[in-house]
Amino acid sequence: MNKYKVAVIDYEFKTLNIEREVLSQLDIELVSGKCKTDEEIIELAGDADGIINQYALINAQVISQLKNCKIISQYGVGVDVVDLDAATSHNIYVSHVPDYGIEEVSNHAIALLLSWSRKIVQYNNSVREGNWSYRYGAPIHRYSHQTLGVLGFGRIPRSLVRKIKHFGFNILVHDPFVADDDIREAGAEPTDLNILLQESDFVTVHVPLNEQTRYLINKDNLSTMKKNAVIINAARGPIINEDDLVEALQNKQIAGAALDVLENEPVASNNPLLKMENVIITPHSAFYSEESMQEFRTKAAQSVVDALNGKAPKYLVNKDVNSS
């Protein structure tokens, strides 16, 4: 059997021991780097049989210079950093791991919602400044008197709705790709985007980033939201136009935001969101638990093994690819 070369072109982990163990099912040479440019990717992975990637941009120019590549396996859910059309045209599988962080991300979105709505951060800061009064968090309202809008109804938002419906929210869901009866069976009410934004006190974002969803939340529809409304985003930063969000917050068109993701990461020190007391920001950490990390790294590597064994990976994204 021929020896294969697999390149991990971007990662945040201390070691690649998990990947190395999974890849040991085949005779594989594992190389790694933290590539930031096209040239660095091509130098490391130009002759690789498989690529594993976290955040590096794999565009059409890069893909055209991959001589032997059979699969690009993305850590995690998002594949917006890969040019899917180019990969498909070059008969390269693109895979991801859509099911590894369902509990973590849904829990994190709920934590952001509860922290903002119960003013946990504000109370903590005011107590540390010597203020001991519930009034520093006013106003706070009962959840049973409020509406939660959920954008998207895939695995993560379904998990979120299952958990949070017990808090008493009226729950609206917008997802044009899911049957209305399916949404109702989960305990929510289907609606269109405009009505959801106009009627919700909290909006939590759970759609993938693509051409249709980039800047889905923007100046036009932010202006239609309630003045007490809060946006929670644990999906992808560019789903919300950040400049428009800043403007809406500064003009008090909406009340606040709780964000795990931003348009540009890591956050710049001069980002105005950092100075706003009505904004909670976490460092793209919603996916994280020790167990979820083990799972998505194992599954990403296993997709490479499957592809090199001549099988379509379980979590194939570009299903039109011709790998023969």
Image (cartoon, helix red, strand yellow):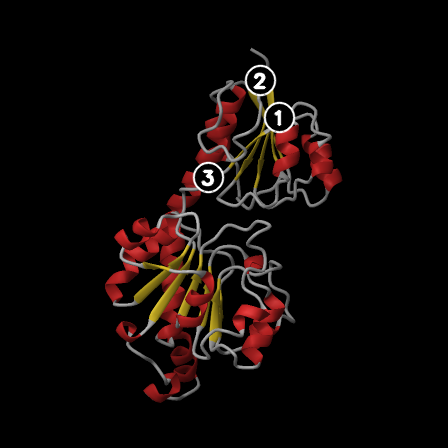
Q: Quadrant of the N terminus?
A: top right
Residue type of the residue flagged with mark 3: Val
Numbered badge on residue 91:
1
Q: Name the one closer to the observer, 283 or 246.
A: 246
Separation of residues labelled 2 and 3 (CA atoms): 23 Å
Q: Is residue 15 above or below residue 232?
A: above
- Residue 170 appears in the picture as rendered: yes
Residue type of the residue flagged with mark 2: Ser
SS for callout 3: loop
- Dots 2 and 1: beta carbons under 8 Å? yes
Q: Quadrant of the C terminus?
A: top right
Q: Residue furthest top?
A: 1
SS for callout 2: loop
Q: Which residue is mark 3?
A: 97
Relative to 232, 276 lies left or right: right
Q: Name the one closer to the observer, 180 or 288.
A: 180
Q: Name the one closer to the observer, 217 or 138.
A: 217
Residue type of the residue flagged with mark 1: Asn
- Residue displayed at 44% across by 74% down: 229
The numbered mark, 3 or 1, whose residue comes first in the sequence reads 1
**Mark toward the viewer: 2 or 3:** 2
Separation of residues labelled 3 and 1 (CA atoms): 20 Å
- How dense is the environment of label 3, judged by Cα within 10 Å: few (below 14), some, or many (20 and up)? many
Q: Is residue 97 above or below residue 275?
A: above
Separation of residues labelled 2 and 1 (CA atoms): 8 Å
- Residue displayed at 52% across by 28% down: 304
SS for callout 1: loop
Count of numbered circles on the image? 3
Which quadrant of the figure has residue 320? top right
Q: Which residue is mark 2?
A: 324
